[in-house]
Image: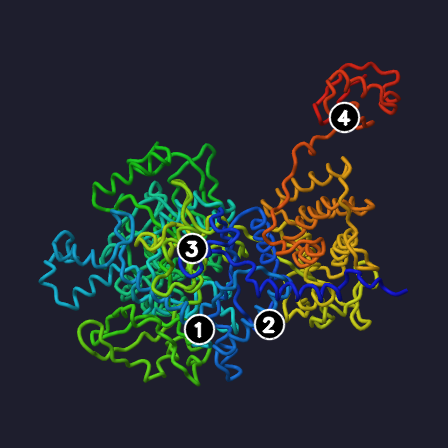
Amino acid sequence: MTEPAHRYDAKLANEIEPRWQERWEAEQTFRAPNPAGPLAEPDHPRAGAPKKFVMDMFPYPSGAGLHVGHPLGFIATDAYSRYLRMAGYNVLHPMGFDAFGLPTEQYAIATGRQPAEITAENIDRYRRQLRLVGMGYDNRRAFATTDPDYFKWTQWIFLQIFNSWYDTEADRARPIDELIAAFESGERATPDGRPWAELGAVERRRVIDGHRLAYVTEAPVNWCPGLGTVLSNEEVTSEGRSERGNFPVYTRTLKQWMMRITAYADRLLSDLDGLDWSDSLKSMQRNWIGKSTGAYVDFGTYAGDIRVFTTRPDTLFGATYMVLAPEHPLVEALTAESWPAGVPAAWTGGHDTPAAAVAAYRAFAAAKTDVERQADAKEKTGVFTGGYATNPVNGETVPVFIADYVLAGYGTGAIMAVPAHDERDFAFAKAFDLPIRQVISGEAPWDGESAYTSDGVAVNSGILDGLRVLEAKARIVEWLAEHGRGEGATTFRLRDWLFSRQRYWGEPFPIVYDETGLPVALSEEHLPVELPHMDDFSPKTFDPEDADSAPEPPLGRAKDWVEVELDLGDGPKTYTRELNTMPNWAGSSWYELRYTDPQAAEKLADPANESYWMGPQDAEDVGGVDLYIGGVEHAVLHLLYARFWQKVLFDLGHVSSREPFRRLFNQGYIQAYAYTDDRGVYVPAEEVREEAEGVFTYNGQKVNREYGKMGKSLKNVVTPDEVCASYGADTFRVYEMSMGPLAESKPWETRAIVGSQRFLQRLWRNIVDEETGEVTVVDAAPAPETLRELHKAIAGVRDDYEHLRMNTAVAKLITLNNHVTGLNPVPREVAEALVAMAAPIAPHIAEELWERLGHEGGIAYVDFPVADESHLVEDTVTYPVQINGKVRGRIEVAAGADEATVKAAALAEEKVAANLAGKDVKKVIVVAGKMVSIVAK
């Protein structure tokens, strides 16, 4: 039997879809007019309309291209944007590419090609795939972070940060020139109290550099000799190895660029309250920032005071030892020449002298990253320095240890240990047989088997005895301040942002160094600073086990580029360029701003355009993008960095909103089954057969099934190209949107796609005759029942689109479509509304049907249907009838029936009456419009 000539199938879909994609591109259908500049368009159908700015977390263009899991969020934002456009909004929906980074650089090194060439190819592949699935972007606003016209402004933002300082009294960033003026006028004292004029030129620069929001310092970093570069914490596994290559990673102290994000810690916390983000996402940000209130306490030693921060100053009388990070600056001075008499062997690490023990332990700790040290926190290791400190509240002498569970980069790099009331300290005390003294007592006696961490009253604590915890905290902070041994304080877990990478494929710093070795900012006219062409740009790598090696950035080999003659205001001079590049986070920390005005040549963005798309809508609004969708894996760092940059730019007056992303939504993931044979080797998932329930075979051999991510190495990748070729892009889009709630992860099942294809085939058949290709709708008025079904669907689908419930929107469209399938003929009013409602999710078939229905100009700007409330009123209401809590029947009564009528109908219902035979009806309760409950005995 031959297929009808005009049936909607993959062949027809693959004829329709490219045609509409070409038309959208030729007509720039999805362009969004700006209020000013070259992208202004007063005659645009949405010029002057309310705006919506919808964004995806832009992708890193890898060589593998997209698999079917990647477009989930992209399709959702596209459908949402198409709906908003039809609902009357001026919608900005752009897409760019986050293209600098280590993967491309490593692939280029392995293949002997240039990263720029590989990046261009990968972006072309992504663009082709995104077009294939029907994305409606404003392509005039597309860019990659590797475009010189883009990273010029990344470098410009860096200079704004470098040339700023944080005024804690004003609680905002200010230009560095204002700080210099304050020192010059004497309004601000110099660190050592000398007049500004008495400081030498280099001394002045060092003072100013110490206040900048971007600064160079010696910092502990994750050094990976096998890769030849420093890694961020997120690039290191919990086993202390590099995520790429699985090389060992070591902690080294190196000269690095840092950004003073900690200055914004309080604002990063408080401004979360104004964001439309999930509570779980806000909690992740709050935990990362980690605000703690407590006190600084100074313990005296012969080498100088050891300052600790504690959130439990009320337990100070219970401090029986101290622990320093192995990198703490006082370790060497505290280390004794010989072991004090009677020192337990466990404290010495088996070494003859404290110096030997400390040196060995420092080497042991240096072989671990901070991530690894935190992961290993349950296994307590450490050694005694041979030195002691004095507890300021009771004069008691306590031993000082070093241990890797205390990190130099957190707090002060030292802790007072109160083992009776801290689980970590308790475990260490047990391991090293240290005293454990209870200083907080609860209602029940303490058994001493684990730390007591609940509330209670102070005991064994002198001046604090009998006080509750909060009272004791307040009293001891007062005592410390009165005696000059500490002060109340607030600290944060957040640390300054390590901003250097020893790589080639990244944004060059707009920084040079003069003869003093101090950094000098380039002027705007020297931007962008572009990478030199290098045939060999591989970083110098070392033996993976060589922890004592140090990075040698590849840019150091570009001698003609490194040494440069410039006139930066004091005549031509020779300078040396910064050899590190920026981290891959840099370009993604501000890209939403460039989308608002990508063709601006003299500014980051025209203020009229930036404030139109991102400005606050009222006094309470923090501003930002109206909807930002992406994976939860970026819930902390990317968002913190972007928020930090936005706030600096806001403080300096360059932007109107203090937050970059007003509303954020994390989509779930599409996962897949993978299969391994008896050797544990992955086999192609598409060739596996299910022989019986739960029994899977590959080439006749039984295989094991596992569930998780989709990936090339797992041999379970399905690409959009394959699905679109077999079913069409609209079927692919409908399937992804119907799989389940957008926020949840769900399994990919290719065989289930056919259901989405059948929906679109029925939609097509309801309007087009499959045999002749003629439109079959009529201009007759719909029946009342059909009008009710139509307007119920309109109200529901509209609400679902508004709230990103794409799966339930599809379900309502299918329900209406099935109702329409039973109509013969189909009224035009119903057909057109159905097509318009389907357009956001299945745009190609909707455009085709809309044109065949006799309309010109496309469907993108057609008004989205609005429900008529008069058709949403039900004529009748169905009540379930319960007897003693069990449903025994149902009745249908007029929607306006009074309570007496409903009761009478319920008691008369045949099944209900039979169940009540011989029983005494005690009570009949009518819940209006919901149910009838009968109590009978």
Q: Amino acid at mark 4?
A: Gly
| Residue pointed to by mark 2 | 64
Q: Quadrant of the N terminus?
A: bottom right
Which mark is in front, 4 or 3? 3
SS state under label 4: loop
Task: Specify few, some or many for label 3: CA neighbours under 10 Å numbering under 14, 14-19, or 20 or more.
Answer: some
Disc 4 + disc 1, Cβ < 8 Å: no
Which mark is in front, 1 or 2? 2
Task: Specify few, some or many for label 1: CA neighbours under 10 Å numbering under 14, 14-19, or 20 or more.
Answer: many
Q: Amino acid at mark 2?
A: Ala
Q: Tag 3 or tag 4, which sits nearer the N-term?
A: 3
- What is the CA distance from the residue labelled 4 to the residue labelled 1? 68 Å
- What is the CA distance from the residue labelled 2 to the residue labelled 4? 59 Å
The label number, if any, that marks residue 885 in the structure image: 4
Disc 4 + disc 3, Cβ < 8 Å: no
Which mark is in front, 2 or 4? 2
Q: Tag 3 or tag 1, which sits nearer the N-term?
A: 1
Q: Amino acid at mark 1?
A: Cys
Residue 144 lies, in percent from the top left, at 47, 68
Disc 2 + disc 3, Cβ < 8 Å: no
Residue 450 lies, in percent from the top left, at 48, 45
Q: Tag 2 or tag 1, which sits nearer the N-term?
A: 2
The label number, if any, that marks residue 224 in the structure image: 1
| Residue pointed to by mark 3 | 640
Disc 1 + disc 2, Cβ < 8 Å: no
- What is the CA distance from the residue labelled 1 to the residue labelled 3? 25 Å
SS state under label 3: helix
Which mark is in front, 1 or 3? 3
Out of 498 and 273, give the one closest to the viewer.
Answer: 273
From this viewpoint, is residue 880 visible?
yes
- What is the CA distance from the residue labelled 4 to the residue labelled 3? 53 Å
- Residue 680 location, quadrant: bottom right
